[in-house]
Image: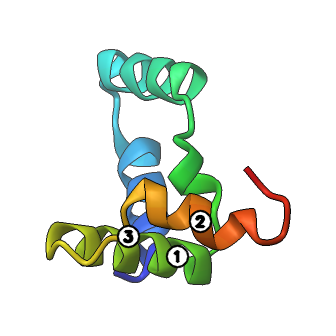
């Protein structure tokens, strides 16, 4: 998706409309939209999270007890 092109297309639609309801809906949406923590990550971080979720879906996880043993060596709990 070309984000810049999408933004320009949306702006053009808004500029060319006389539909006050549409304008009010867009305004309300933008004012009330809350960003998800995922949206605040950079592209590399998002890629890493999605990769981790894919691995978890495949069952490629480490049990909590094993993680505690591994990190317990460094005094982490």
* Res. 4 mark: 1
Determine whether label 1 and label 2 are within 8 Å by CB: no
- Which residue sits at x=35%, y=50%? 13
Rendering coords of residue 63 (x, y %): 37, 61
Q: Earlier in the sequence, mark 2 or mark 3?
A: 3
Q: Nearer the viewer, residue 62 or 57?
A: 62
Q: Nearer the viewer, residue 55 or 71?
A: 71
Rendering coords of residue 30 (x, y %): 54, 30
Residue tagged 3: 62
Tally of marks:
3
User: What is the quadrant of the N terminus in the image?
Assistant: bottom left
Image depth: mark 2 or mark 3 in front: 2
Q: Residues within 10 Å of mark 3 (few under 14, many from 20)?
A: few
Q: Nearer the viewer, residue 71 or 51?
A: 71
Q: Earlier in the sequence, mark 1 or mark 2?
A: 1
Rendering coords of residue 66 (x, y %): 47, 66
Q: Nearer the viewer, residue 6 or 12?
A: 6
Q: Residues within 10 Å of mark 1 (few under 14, many from 20)?
A: few
Determine whether label 1 and label 3 are within 8 Å by CB: no
Rendering coords of residue 16 (x, y %): 38, 46
Q: CA distance from mark 2 to mark 3?
A: 11 Å
Q: Quadrant of residue 10?
A: bottom left
SS at circle 2: helix
- Which residue sits at x=36%, y=80%? 51
- Which residue sits at x=31%, y=15%? 21
Q: Residues within 10 Å of mark 2 (few under 14, many from 20)?
A: few
SS at circle 1: helix
Image depth: mark 1 or mark 2 in front: 2
* Res. 69 mark: 2
Q: Quadrant of residue 9?
A: bottom left
């Amino acid at each position: 998706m070309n984000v810049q092109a999408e933004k320009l297309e949306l702006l053009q639609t808004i500029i060319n409309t006389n539909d006050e309801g549409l304008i009010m809906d867009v305004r309300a949406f933008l004012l009330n939209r809350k960003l998800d923590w995922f949206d605040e990550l950079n592209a590399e971080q998002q890629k890493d999270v999605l990769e981790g979720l894919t691995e978890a879906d495949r069952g490629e996880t480490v049990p909590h007890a094993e993680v505690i043993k591994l990190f317990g060596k460094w005094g982490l709990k």
